[in-house]
Amino acid sequence: MKVKIESYSDKYSKYFYDLNHDWLSEFFYVEEYDEKVLKNCKEEIIDKGGYIFFALYNTEVVGTMALIPRGKSIYELNKMAVKKNLRGNGIGHQLIQFIIDYSVKNNFESVILYSNTVLKNSIHLYNKFGFKEIDNPDAPYKRSNIKMELKLSNLRK
């Protein structure tokens, strides 16, 4: 399923909240930090130098993902969610590839992410794209038990 990926627009903020809230509720629970970011995504991500992207199939928002600045030229891949009935159709794959391409083009040093090892499909996908497990002393989420990083210097042409 080929999707078009668009940058943040206020008209999509409801989908950012809904898709992520549904995903978090299905697999874990919505933490206080999540609720703050999801309800105020423009202020908490965009206005702080981050990025939010939406995957559209025809005109329907079917997925979303954010990049949040976490250091000099280091961004956290964050709040990735795909509509439940469309998972397994390659939307997450396209979102991650887009984020990597975007990060390389913008000369970011690396992309990190926090996850949980119970999400075997997600971890497999991250590994497939070259993310490697690193120390996880600073996880901002209670549910996180793994931190991964993709160093981008090898991907530059």
Image (cartoon, rainbow, N blue to C red):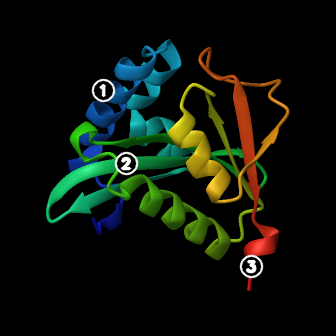
- Is 43 left or right of 108, judged from the image as shown? left
Name the N-terminal-most of marks 1 and 3.
1
List x then y, in percent, for residue 50: 55, 50
Disc 1 residue type? Asp
Quadrant location of residue 138? Answer: top right
Residue 13 image position (x, y, % from top left):
28, 42
State the CA–CA distance, disc 1 to disc 3: 35 Å
Q: Residues within 10 Å of mark 2 (few under 14, many from 20)?
A: many
The disc label shown at residue 124, or none: none
Residue 118, placed above or below residue 96: above
Q: Position of residue 78 (x, y in %)?
A: 54, 41
Q: Quadrant of the N terminus?
A: bottom left
Report how far apart the C-alphas of labels 1 and 2 lie in the structure: 12 Å
> In the image, what residue occupies the spot 59% across and 17% down?
143
Distance CA(mark 3)–CA(mark 2)? 25 Å
In the structure shown, which secondary structural element does the residue marked by tag 2 occupy? Answer: strand
Query: Residue at the left extreme?
Result: 59
The earlier-in-sequence mark between 3 and 2 is 2
Q: Secondary structure at mark 3?
A: loop
Identity, as a three-letter code, of the amino acid under mark 3: Arg
> Do tag 3 and tag 2 residues touch (Cβ < 8 Å)?
no
Residue at the spot of label 3:
156
Residue under circle 2?
64
What's the amino acid at mark 2?
Thr
Task: Quickly name the residue at label 1.
Answer: 22
**Is 145 or 152 nearer to us in this picture?**
145
Q: Compared with residue 58, is residue 112 higher up or lower down, i.e. above or below?
A: above
Q: Check if mark 1's residue and mark 3's residue have beta carbons within 8 Å.
A: no
